[in-house]
Image: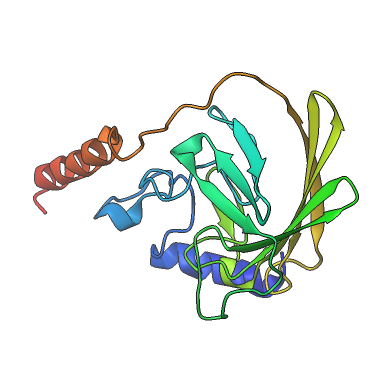
């Protein structure tokens, strides 16, 4: 990270909000805005973008039509519709999953995404967020290595946060098992319990 990005991250953490982390450890839980994006059922903690393997629900389904490729993550059933039309949406239109455009480079599907919202980081771990999605240029490459293996490669390019772009690659294994709906909001008792617990602690402290 650049020194400026370190300073911004420390200042944002001290301020408390807005929350860009997928999971927040030790949140004061004054309201829903104080807990992580996955805890609020906004974005899964492994659904990306980019997609990073984590504790569970790492399954992904890809399928295509004549003009689009769809990336469906089992975690919080995120869906990214990747257009093969090159023209991006206007700069002012910001989205949780970004604005994605795809093209074929031989046997590799290349997906470039921009126009993320500033409510996400430009890169994340399960409990950390770095930079702002507003300045992220993400390039993903999907290459079928053999009948059972897909190579997923991503490059993070955010010069306002990192001193240089970086790339990682992950192998994905084919499965015939179905994806299941991750009914996050319907079963999100954790949010209710967390806020109820915080109110109880405040009551005991006389706040």
Residue 137, image x and y in percent?
A: 70, 67
Residue 112, image x and y in percent?
A: 72, 62
Q: Is 135 or 184 nearer to us in this picture?
A: 184
Apparent side of residue 162 relative to residue 107 in the rendered image (left or right): left
Residue 197, image x and y in percent?
A: 20, 38
Q: Is 124 or 94 nearer to us in this picture?
A: 94
Vertical placement of residue 27 versus 75, above or below: below
Quadrant position of the C terminus in the picture: bottom left
Count of marks, rendered view: 0
Q: Is residue 52 visible?
A: no
Vertical placement of residue 115 versus 61, above or below: below
Apparent side of residue 124 relative to residue 155 in the rendered image (left or right): left
Apparent side of residue 177 relative to residue 154 in the rendered image (left or right): left
Give the residue furthest to the right. Answer: 106
Give me the residue at 59% from left, 19% from top. Answer: 177
| Coloring basis for residues | rainbow
Give me the residue at 52% from left, 47% from top. Answer: 79
Quadrant position of the N terminus in the picture: bottom right
Apparent side of residue 58 relative to residue 66 in the rendered image (left or right): left
- Splitting the image into 4 quarters, where does residue 83 fall? bottom right
Q: Is residue 172 visible?
A: yes
Residue 33, image x and y in percent?
A: 32, 57
């Amino acid at each position: 990270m650049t020194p400026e990005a370190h300073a911004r991250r420390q200042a944002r953490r001290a301020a408390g909000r807005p929350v860009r982390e997928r999971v927040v450890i030790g949140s004061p839980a004054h309201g829903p805005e104080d807990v992580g994006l996955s805890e609020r059922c906004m974005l899964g903690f492994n659904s990306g973008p980019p997609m990073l393997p984590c504790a569970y629900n790492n399954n992904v389904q890809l399928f295509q039509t004549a003009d689009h490729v769809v990336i469906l993550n089992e975690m919080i059933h995120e869906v990214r519709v990747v257009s093969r039309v090159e023209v991006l949406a206007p700069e002012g239109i910001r989205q949780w999953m970004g604005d994605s455009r795809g093209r074929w480079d031989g046997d590799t599907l290349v997906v470039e995404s921009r126009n993320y919202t500033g409510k996400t980081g430009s890169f994340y771990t399960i409990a950390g967020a770095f930079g702002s999605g507003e300045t992220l240029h993400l390039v993903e490459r999907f290459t079928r290595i053999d009948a059972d293996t897909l190579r997923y490669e991503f490059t993070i390019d955010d010069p306002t946060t990192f001193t240089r772009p970086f790339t990682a690659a992950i192998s994905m294994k084919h499965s015939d098992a179905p994806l299941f709906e991750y009914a996050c909001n319907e079963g999100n008792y954790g949010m209710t319990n967390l806020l109820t617990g915080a109110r109880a602690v405040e009551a005991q402290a006389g706040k």
